Image (spheres, rainbow, N blue to C red):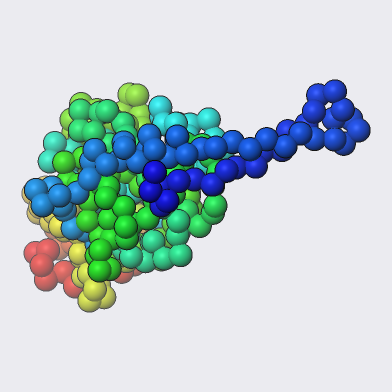
Amino acid sequence: MPLKNRLPLVLVIEPDNASARDGRFSYLYRDMSSTATKKTEEWSKYAIDQTNSTPFTKVHHVTHVDTGLKILKDQLIRPALISDKSVLNTERILVNWLSPNHWNDGYLYGNVRFAFDMETLMKDKRVYWVEYVPYETPAVRFLITDRQHFHPKLILYDLEKEEGPLVRRSGKYSYNGTVALELMIEAELSVDECIQADFVQHHPELCGLKPRCSHLGMRPHEAATRLLGYLMTQPLVDGVEIFLGESKGQVNSRAFEDAITRLLRSVDKTVYRGEINGRSEEEKKTLLSSFCSYLITYEREKFRECISVFSGKEEVQRLLYALLTEKLGITDFSDLE
């Protein structure tokens, strides 16, 4: 067996049942090299070659709109126990899930996508091969951690040397594009480390998180509208700038831009009655903010019915721009009109 794939003998200290009360212990050495051989053969089946090598620089964490808002409020993506049929689902290992995969049929875990730079994420980290999962699109899983693990199911994996489904060569990352690469990150992820956020299509039939998911098939602009509704009715939420462009005040997410554009069209189509002309500008802005709660549930007709109390589309547009500046930091509306 090549030396690089051979695990050291693991020292396990177990109490002697007959004399544990006296503080005496038996010492066992377990040779885990057979496990390493099996695991190595497993990942070798999905090794990168010229036909499937897919370079990437960033990975994504995808979640539902309500969780996305919580992430913004907490400024953290918090790790959780592994709950699916993984070999680690009985362990007290808390992870965040990330992947570079793109799904044309829709994503299984929601609509809001947070992106992280792979090189930054991997700094000073160990990589362990976890498992292969025989889904319709086979999944390969790695644990990324700054801790040292001696779990018999985990095999240390060298990105620079191994011939497997994930490699790092000359400072660049690639994976086997015919499989789903799933990275388990044993750490909290700060929103400050997120390089971009946007919206994706939810799978129309399947959800990997909620048995009765109400967001199946939700389109990016609809998810963006719902998050926009949350943000417009909340006090200022830090971290919203990851949806904006590098130039301060611009919208970076196409879905967010689409959501705001559709909102402006609703404003334009509404028939106004001018029932609150005596209110102050601040009172009107607060009222419009409360009406945005209907965007959370994507009830656009109710939103239009509510805003009809204003004097006209020019007034609502002015108030809406003021709210977008106040709540999201958007100051450049030239691409939205």
Between residues 62 and 182, which one lies in front from this camera angle? 182
Q: Could you tell me if residue 227 is visible in this image? A: no
Asked which quadrant contains residue 335, the reply is bottom left
Q: Where in the figure is residue 240, as x and y percent of width and height?
A: 34, 62
Between residues 152 and 137, which one lies in front from this camera angle? 152
Q: Residue furthest front?
A: 1
Residue at position x 12%, y 63% in the image: 336
Quadrant into which the C terminus falls: bottom left
Image position of 91 (left or right of 172): right
Quadrant into which the N terminus falls: top left
Between residues 127 and 114, which one lies in front from this camera angle? 127
Q: Could you tell me if residue 9 is visible in this image? A: yes
Q: Residue furthest bottom?
A: 247
Image position of 297 (left or right of 32): left
Is 224 situated above or below 205? below
Is 208 situated above or below 175? above
Is 286 situated above or below 192? above
Residue at position x 41%, y 52% in the image: 4
Residue at position x 22%, y 51% in the image: 175
